[in-house]
Image: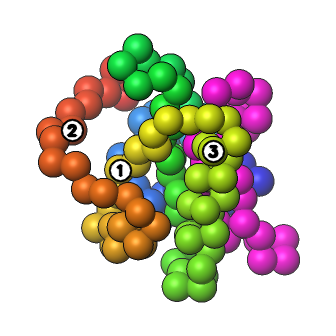
Amino acid sequence: DAAQVALLIKQLTQNIVAPKLLEKRIGQLPKQKNSQFLVALAGNKVVGFGGLAWYTIPSKGLIGWVEEVVVDEAFRRQGIGRAFVNEVLGLAKRKNISQVKLTSVADAKDLYEKLGFVKKDQDYLYKNLIL
């Protein structure tokens, strides 16, 4: 599914670090012990992708990040994104994660707010170390 997932991720963002390695990184996801990613299928076609990554920090304990939830443009507004987020939240509860965070594109903010996420005003900074 890595090639199909890579195409979906390109619908989500153009900010892909080392794009030539994208499919390889996707293929390595099942080996990671601190994340779980899911795909949604329509027949043999991957139409959705997303997951949860988690780690412990001293001030909050185990926290999670909803990562790279994307639904193929032709399949949006059919409940797939909502189902992904609900599945990820269920996974977080089963893992006793204390807090789940995410970043969102403008088009998806309403969905996340309807699912109980609250906008937190803070600066978000990042630095690419690999180009």
Can you tell which quarter of the image residue 47 is in?
bottom right
Q: Residue at x 35, y 50 (%)?
A: 103
Q: Is residue 47 magenta?
A: yes
Q: Label the magenta part by its dominant secondary structure.
A: strand
Q: Is residue 85 magenta?
A: no
The quadrant the C terminus occupies is top left
Q: Is residue 112 above or below residue 129?
A: below
Q: Position of residue 98 (x, y in %)?
A: 50, 35
Question: Which residue position is annotated with label 3?
Answer: 93
Question: Which residue position is annotated with label 2?
Answer: 124
> Label 2 vs label 1: CA separation?
9 Å
- The answer to the question of whether label 2 and label 1 lie on touching residues, with beta carbons closer than 8 A, is yes
> Label 3 vs label 2: CA separation?
26 Å
Q: Is residue 6 above or below residue 95?
A: below
Q: Position of residue 27 (x, y in %)?
A: 73, 38
State the SS at label 2. loop
Q: Position of residue 58 (x, y in %)?
A: 41, 14
